[in-house]
Amino acid sequence: MTVTRRRFLAGTAATAAGLMVAGRMSPARAARNDQMNILCWEGYNSDGVLGPFRAANSGVTVRAESGTSDPDMINKLRAGETSVWDLINVNQPWARDQLYPEGLIKPLSKERFLPYFDKMLPEFAAPYPLAFADDGNLLGMPQRYGPFSFVVNTDKISRETAEDQGWNLFLDPAMKGRYGVLTYDNWNVIHMCLTAGLNPFAAIEGENLSKFRDTAMGIFGGAKLLTDDLVAMNTALINGEIDAYFTGGTYTASPARYDGADNVRAITPNSGPVDGKGGCVWVELTSAVNNPDPSSVAEDFLEFVQTPEIAKAVAFTEGTYNPVSQMGNPDVLAQFDSEELNAIQMDSLAEEMARSLDYDVVTSYDALIDIYTEARRT
């Protein structure tokens, strides 16, 4: 499965091959107090984050590579690159379900890192389930997150109407030709399941596959615009070409909102088919790779990104903006001005989180993506 939330923002600060060569050539490899290598989503590899860390740690070589999907990054570790990387930053289900059981990451020091949870937003207060293994070990630190469902132009469709109708909005015949589909395939599959009244994270078989097929055909059949470019989608929404788009959230709406387009609003349905929830939320975890020659600097960096200025830099980087769990700390929250808080819809984030499922692995993905691909082509 490929996670496509940010697949086209894959800037690379260093190649894995280069890191391997550097590791083999380093005569001080046993100490590893002069290197830190992170495999991450975009943002952690930015100058705004890495620059201050380099300045505070002179003599430490810091390298980062931005991935294109969670599975691709995980497969690098499976292929033997645990000896290359010191930290990995991926979305929430992978640490518990794959990375830790496969021995690819190692527990963090609770003594060192649990106190940071006390200052996080209430949704992430320890023990935040997806940060801990069944055996109680701490597997990673949450930071960026965001509800991810759909987006509307509130000048055309009110927030209240969109939240009440939820995914049924896109099944309304009156909406035909009035919406776009942001083609993040994995997320589209999740959202089409929810639209069909199905749990995307449970097995989908028999008649439920037919429900999914009918829903996928209906949504693609009624769409005016299909693109994987969030800027193009927001532009179409602002220009009045469409009134809503299927698959989107704080992450995709934030650049337009930060530019002053407050009528672009991410929506989380008031209700849905899974325990009454109709939204979905992604959360990133940063974990320590089980490197056989561990860097003593890696956990220093993980602690560094908890600080107010750097947590803000992580939140507002690379042209899209996201809340961070550290905003429960007043010193972190004070880093954001009113326009920035408005851009990430801080006014409704807590209630949207409460209406959202945690992003997880799609159980029947292979069967669903085949149906989805057929519907998209048709």
Image: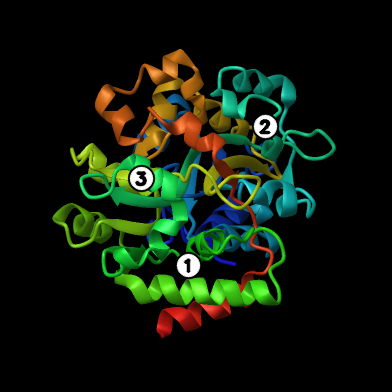
User: Where is residue 179 drawn, in percent x and y?
Assistant: 30, 63
Disc 1 marks which residue? 185
Which of the two residues, 308 or 323, is positioned nearer the viewer here? 323
Q: Say which element carries label 2.
A: loop
Q: Residue at x 70, y 62 (%)?
A: 78
Q: Nearer the viewer, mark 1 or mark 3?
A: 3
* Nearer-N-terminus badge (1/3): 3
Instruction: Check if mark 2's residue and mark 1's residue have beta carbons within 8 Å.
Output: no
**Image side of residue 301 versus residue 345, left or right:** right
Quarter of the rendering occupied by the C terminus: bottom left
User: From this viewpoint, is residue 104 visible?
Assistant: no
User: Where is residue 222 drawn, in percent x and y?
Assistant: 34, 72
User: Where is residue 349 drawn, in percent x and y?
Assistant: 45, 32
Q: Is residue 194 above or below residue 335?
A: below
Which of the two residues, 370 or 39, is positioned nearer the viewer here? 370
Q: Which mark is residue 123?
A: none
Q: Say which element carries label 3.
A: helix
Q: Say which element carries label 1.
A: helix
Disc 2 marks which residue? 128
Q: Residue at x 43, y 20 (%)?
A: 332
Disc 3 marks which residue? 161
User: Where is residue 120 drawn, in percent x and y?
Assistant: 55, 23
Task: Tell me how far mark 2 sits from mark 3, CA to CA.
Answer: 32 Å
Instruction: Check if mark 1's residue and mark 3's residue have beta carbons within 8 Å.
Output: no
Q: Residue at x 44, y 63 (%)?
A: 184
**Image side of residue 273 versus residue 232, left or right:** right
Q: Is residue 232 above or below residue 306?
A: below
* Mark 3 surroundings within 10 Å by alpha-carbon count, few (fewer than 14), some (14 through 19), many (20 or more): few
| Amino acid under disc 1 | Asp
Q: How is the image coloured?
A: rainbow
The quarter of the displayed image where residue 130 is located: top right
